[in-house]
Amino acid sequence: MWPEPRGPGAPDSEVGPTATRDKVGRGEAPAKAILLGEHAVVYGQPAIAVPLPQLRARVQARFDSKLDDLVIETPGKGQVISLRRDPRQPLALAASLACRTLGLTPSFLRLRLDSAVPIASGLGSGAAVSTAIMRALADLLGKALSPEQLSDLVYEVEKLHHGTPSGIDNTVVAHQQPVYFRKGEPAEFLQLPAPLLLLVADTGVSSVTREAVASLRRAREEDPEGVNRKLAAIGDLVGHAREALIAADWQELGHLLDANHAILAELRLSSPELERLIAAARGAGALGAKPTGAGRGGHAIALVTSESEASATLAMVDAGARRVTLCRVEP
């Protein structure tokens, strides 16, 4: 049960020594890309994901003594989310979970969200926005939530987005580190010896995780042996990719991305738009390319070098990409 609000003066009575009525709390979090292993990770296989620092969600939080509610404003979309009106809306839930953990009354609060992470595109928008909201509320109080706390809280929000999430999105976004992940096991954070250059290309087609996951589940029910064999093959690729990342063997990693893409296509988790972007990137010098996330739309990723980045970008734009972002994952 929440503490009772204390009237217009409640904000001052709820805050720590560094928080005042005029303070602005700030939080941000990156998008993420799954390098290899999406879908297979739901069935116990490993996956590797990396943060995308160039695509970020940012939130500002402040007290508003005239507001007997917690509201989240999204100026880019003209949307206002009210915790009182819709407590199970995912962003409202993220805020309320953070308030509960921080011991903050979920009232007299106004949040502003600005996100460069596309929605329903396989880049972890839900996890990024939830993490940014929680960090902003903690910063408003002059406190901090650990990456482990954030990951656990964001996982609860991810259940609303995806039903039965693997946990990889909240892990990589909250920790902001490349991760080798297997559901139910401790995450292994990977140290890269050199920067990883990825082009992230938007097909312009929404990718609904629930639908893609349900499609694969039906296929597995119809042909359990065949689909399980493909999922295990993806798991083997992920193990090799872990070694390639640690060694900065980008040529080998590119081959592994291509092999993962081939299996995803066999599982009908690609799309004509993705195929065009992937073929264009490879033809322009990318070391490897594949869908990332749920597939059937959303984004393609292409592993490039500093020499091939410009030509691969132009090729993907010519092939229909709505936007191509160069993301640099630093050691």
Image (tube, helix red, strand yellow):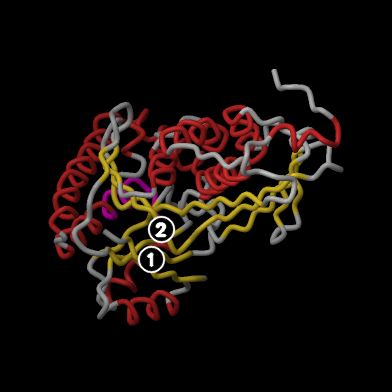
How far apart marks 1 and 2 lie (CA) works out to 6 Å
Magenta residue span: 261-272
Q: Is residue 246 left or right of residue 146?
A: left
Asked where in the image residue 238 lies, by quadrant, the reply is: top left
Q: Secondary structure at mark 1?
A: strand
Residue at the far front in the pictured view: 17
Residue at 57% of width from left, 40% of height from top?
A: 138
- Label whose residue precedes the other's in the sequence (1 or 2): 2
Q: Is residue 263 located in the magenta-colored stretch of the structure?
A: yes
Using the rendered image of the protein, determine whether residue 276 is visible from the camera's viewpoint: no
Is the residue 194 above or below the residue 42 in the image?
Answer: below
Q: Residue at x 48, y 61 (%)?
A: 55
Where's residue 7, x and y in %? 85, 31
**Circle on res. 52:** 2
| Residue at 39% in and 44% down | 175
Q: In the image, residue 114 lies at what x, y percent?
A: 63, 58
Residue 183 vs residue 227, the one in the foreground: 183
- In the image, 231 versus 22, the foreground residue is 22
Q: How many marks?
A: 2
**Which quadrant of the figure contains the N terminus?**
top right
Count residues near mark 1 (Cα–Cα under 10 Å), then give few for <14, some for 14-19, many for 20+: some
Q: Amino acid at mark 2?
A: Leu
Work out whether residue 287 can be spotted: yes
Judging by the rendered image, the residue that carries numbered circle 1 is: 327
Which of the labelled discs sits on residue 164, or is there none? none
Residue at 39% of width from left, 70% of height from top?
326
Residue count near mark 2 (Cα–Cα under 10 Å), binned few <14, some 14–19, many ≥20: many
Above or below residue 163? Residue 118 is: below
Three-letter amino acid code at disc 1? Cys
When asked about the image quadrant of residue 92, the answer is: top right
Magenta-drawn stretch contains 328: no
Quadrant (top left/top right/bottom left/bottom right) for the C terminus:
bottom left
